[in-house]
Each structure stands twice: as C-alpha cells, then as structure tokens.
Amino acid sequence: MGGCGAADRLVGQCAQGCLTDGALADGNGCPAAMCRESLPKTEGDPCQAAADCLPTLATWSATAVENPHLACDVGSHTCVAADPPVVAGWLQACSADLIGPMMDGQTYGFDTAVPDPGCGEGWCAVYREVGATCVANACTRPCTGDHQCPAGATCVGVIPGGCIRAVRAYCKPGGPASVGFTCR
C-alpha cells in the first residue's frame, strides 16, 4: 500500500500504488481516484480474482449507453465480458402512494432515488423537470459503480474511485444526462 499526494500532504492510501508519483487529487474530492486500482478495467486486462476486473466505466451518447460488465476468467487470468446484473423489478412503476405526494405543490425539479418498499430492491428513481405535471419514476437499486447496474444504465452520483458525490447513488437508465424512464 502506498500513499498519494505531495510530499508534505498525504491525501490517500492505495493498495496498488498511485497513478502518478506525487499526484494530487484532481479536484473531484476523491483521493481514491488517484489509485491504480481505481482505473477503469477493460476486457483483456489481467486478473487473479473478480475484484481485479472492477471498476468498469460506462460511456454514453445522446442515443446509447455502453456499460461493460466483466468477470475474471481464472483459466486465462484475463477480464472477459460477463452478463449484466439483474435488478428485481427494474424499470417497473414505483408505488403510487409515493409518487402522488411528490407532485403536491412542488414547483421545483429533482433527480434522485428514494426508498420504496413496493420496488423489488426497495428503491425508486424519480425525476421531475421544473413545471412538469408528472414525475418520471422507475424501480432501481443503490450502487457504488456502473458494474452494479443493468445494461443501458449508469450509477449516477459516483465518480471513478468509488466516491459518492450525491446523497444517494443509484442506477439510472439512459445515463446521467437523460431521464431514461417513464413519466407516470
């Protein structure tokens, strides 16, 4: 394990060393982002165990999200493509008794996840534009990285290195800049 940061200011400890000797945090507030183990992994990278193939990093455009999922092939010791995780109730409508109160007198927009016992994994993603007459919503799951989200989804609220920037990080269909689920 090695320390990262300037000689006079240690800002993080890394199991596999720093990306660059003397590196400083890049302004994202996540010291772990300076660690070699935080580099996104790709198919063909060397591995000894499943954790060596994490994290993966989704990319997106206006029309598509590419979310690689990897596993460690212990025979070849390389990261290989894997099936995406299954999220119970993924994209099903959230509880009506939850969404109704969100519209009562609301004049502001929001994009977050809230607890919902009616969803298979207990969470509901909600999005509302300012002035909208409904709340886009769908069942989701909390996450710590894109690898925990289904195909076509990203883990919003997390930055590379696994640091959570938002109150709650969750899988969002369609990528961070789009709604990706239905207004109900």
Image: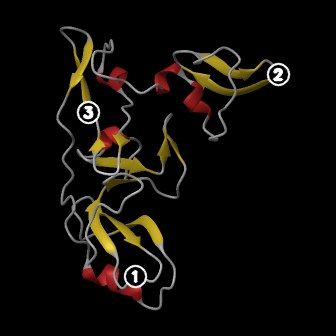
Would you name the residue on which mark 3 appears? Answer: 69
Give the foreground label among 2 and 1.
Answer: 1
Find residue 74 and report its image quarter: top left
The amino acid sitting under disc 2 is Asp
* Residue 163 place in picture, x, y as percent: 53, 41
In the image, is 116 to the left or to the right of 10?
left
Crowding near pointer 1: few (<14 within 10 Å), some, many (20+)?
A: some
Q: CA distance from mark 1 to mark 3?
A: 35 Å
CB under 8 Å between discs 1 and 3: no
Would you name the residue on which mark 2 appears? Answer: 8
* Residue 61 place in picture, x, y as percent: 35, 46
Instruction: Give the mark nearer the N terminus: 1 vs 3.
Output: 3
Q: CA distance from mark 2 to mark 1?
A: 51 Å
Would you name the residue on which mark 1 appears? Answer: 132
Q: Is residue 53 above or below residue 128?
A: above
Crowding near pointer 2: few (<14 within 10 Å), some, many (20+)?
A: few
Give the foreground label among 1 and 3.
Answer: 1
The amino acid sitting under disc 3 is His
CB under 8 Å between discs 2 and 3: no
The amino acid sitting under disc 1 is Ala
Q: Is residue 114 above or below residue 101?
A: above
